[in-house]
Image: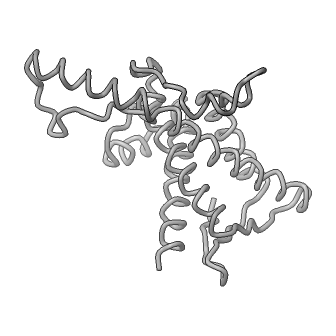
């Protein structure tokens, strides 16, 4: 899958994608959307004004992918186990932070993922069955960058990857290993993400 992002004169980015690549990115993004869940406005009878004051969950999600996407805000970055009192204080601070931020974080990730699906659908409609060049505006490029990051976090959680060295080791898995397609997607999306970052740098 050789396509990588290149800069456009207006500050956006472009990448050549074939039908298989389009299908892979779209499928993974739709799965991510299903995991994040619908927004409050998509629920029947939702009050848009009430959404501004709605509180989010206080407990971390149980799904490992959602835990990676919405981690606790407080904890020891060095990994040193805290004492009982310190751990309780960290949980309380994390719960308070999560209550007032997770809904917005989910909304942002949802919008990024929807932007990816919409641009891919537009590309598929225009290009038909052949390869095509996806051209993104600066705003769309930023949405794609966020979504690619979330997709890699999701795949990394499913593969139990905690650092890139582990990803390199997984690359050496035999082709018959059921994890191999996810590993290849993880590495490919990483290349796309890096090329998009480089494209958007001033």
Q: Is residue 195 left or right of residue 58?
A: right
The colour scheme of the drawn protein is one colour
Which residue is depicted at the point 34% across and 26% down? 96
Q: For the view shown, which residue lies furthest in the left direction?
A: 83
63 in relation to 195, above or below: above
Which quarter of the image is occupied by the N terminus?
bottom right
Q: Position of residue 193 (x, y in %)?
A: 52, 59
Q: Nearer the viewer, residue 79 or 85?
A: 85
Nearest to the observer: residue 23 or residue 93: 93
Residue 119 relative to residue 103: left or right? right
What residue is at 92 percent from the left and 57 percent from the top? 128
Residue 88 placement (x, y as % from top left): 18, 17
Res. 16 image quadrant? bottom right
Vertical relation: 17 (above or below) 102: below
Image coordinates for residue 73, horizontal then vertical, percent: 31, 35
| Outermost residue toward the front in this view | 49
Q: Outermost residue, bottom direction?
A: 9
Q: Is residue 13 left or right of residue 23?
A: left
The residue located at (49%, 66%) in the rendering is 197
Residue at image position (64%, 71%) is: 13
Q: Residue 153: x percent and y percent?
A: 46, 41
Could you say which quadrant of the image residue 192 lies in?
Answer: bottom right
């Amino acid at each position: 899958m050789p396509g990588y992002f290149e800069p456009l004169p207006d500050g956006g980015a472009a990448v050549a994608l074939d039908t298989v690549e389009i299908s892979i990115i779209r499928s993974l993004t739709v799965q991510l959307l299903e995991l994040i869940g619908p927004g409050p406005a998509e629920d029947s009878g939702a009050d848009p004004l009430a959404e501004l004051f709605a509180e989010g969950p206080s407990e971390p999600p149980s799904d490992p992918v959602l835990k990676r996407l919405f981690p606790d805000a407080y904890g020891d970055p060095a990994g040193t186990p805290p004492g009982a009192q310190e751990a309780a204080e960290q949980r309380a601070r994390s719960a308070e932070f999560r209550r007032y931020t997770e809904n917005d974080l989910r909304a942002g990730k949802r919008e990024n993922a929807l932007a990816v699906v919409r641009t891919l659908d537009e590309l598929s409609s225009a290009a038909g069955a052949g390869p095509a060049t996806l051209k993104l505006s600066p705003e769309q490029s930023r949405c794609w960058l966020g979504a690619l990051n979330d997709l890699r976090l999701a795949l990394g959680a499913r593969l139990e990857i905690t650092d890139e060295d582990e990803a390199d080791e997984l690359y050496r898995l035999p082709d018959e290993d059921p994890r191999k397609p996810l590993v290849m997607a993880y590495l490919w999306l990483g290349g796309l993400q890096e090329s998009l970052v480089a494209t958007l740098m001033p």
